[in-house]
Image: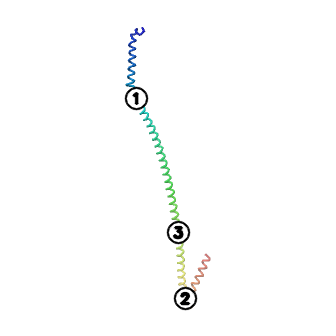
Amino acid sequence: MEIFKDFGVEPVLILGQIVNFLILLFILKKIFFKPILNHLEKRRKIIEEGLRNAQEAQKIIEKAKKEYQETISKAKAEFNQILEDARIQANKITYDAQLKAQKNVEAMLQEAREKIAQDRINLENEVKKDMVRLVAIAVEKVTKGLITRKQSEEYTRSSLLELYQHEQKTS
């Protein structure tokens, strides 16, 4: 203990300072540290809860992004399907219209052929009548009273009919 005295340290004062320090430590612990620690604990819990909420929010955001991407993908797929269906429908309508137009053209051609054939028959009949009449007039002028006009027309008509039937057989 002499060493303490050599340096000017008194053990009673040091002991008093230690007791004072312990009393001060006890008071600080009870009065200041406990509320501060409680406040720090509350703060830590709030921060942890905030972090949990942030993680949950991040999960919800990621889930929403995933659902958004799935919805966009489905919408694109539906759009592409609708577009493909529209193309198919348009092609079908075009094909049907072409087929209908082709049938209409064929019907018109057939109708025109029939009309031409009927016109040809009518024209041939008119030509025959005119020929019979002209031949009858010519025969009458040549024969001048040997046969009647009616006999001449009948003879000419039968002759022309024979010529026509002969022509049909050779064609």
C-alpha separation, residue under disc 1 versus residue under disc 3: 101 Å
C-alpha separation, residue under disc 1 versus residue under disc 2: 145 Å
For disc 2, the marked residue is 150
Q: Identify the amino acid type marked 1.
A: Asn
Q: Between 67 and 105, which is closer to the camera in this rendering?
A: 67
Residue 93: where, in percent of width, then height?
Answer: 50, 60
Task: Judge left or right: residue 103 versus residue 9.
Answer: right
Q: Nearer the viewer, mark 2 or mark 3?
A: 3
Residue 144: where, in percent of width, then height?
Answer: 54, 90
Q: Identify the amino acid type marked 2.
A: Lys
Q: Residue 18, relative to residue 104: is it above or below?
A: above
Q: Residue 72, relative to residue 168: is it above or below?
A: above
Q: Residue at x 57, y 86 (%)?
A: 154
Task: Judge left or right: residue 103 versus residue 47.
Answer: right
For disc 1, the marked residue is 38
In the picture, the quarter occupied by the N terminus is top left
Residue 107 - label: 3
Residue 65: where, in percent of width, then height?
Answer: 46, 43
Answer whether labels 2 and 3 touch (C-beta < 8 Å): no
Q: Residues within 10 Å of mark 3 (few under 14, many from 20)?
A: few
Quarter of image, res 12? top left
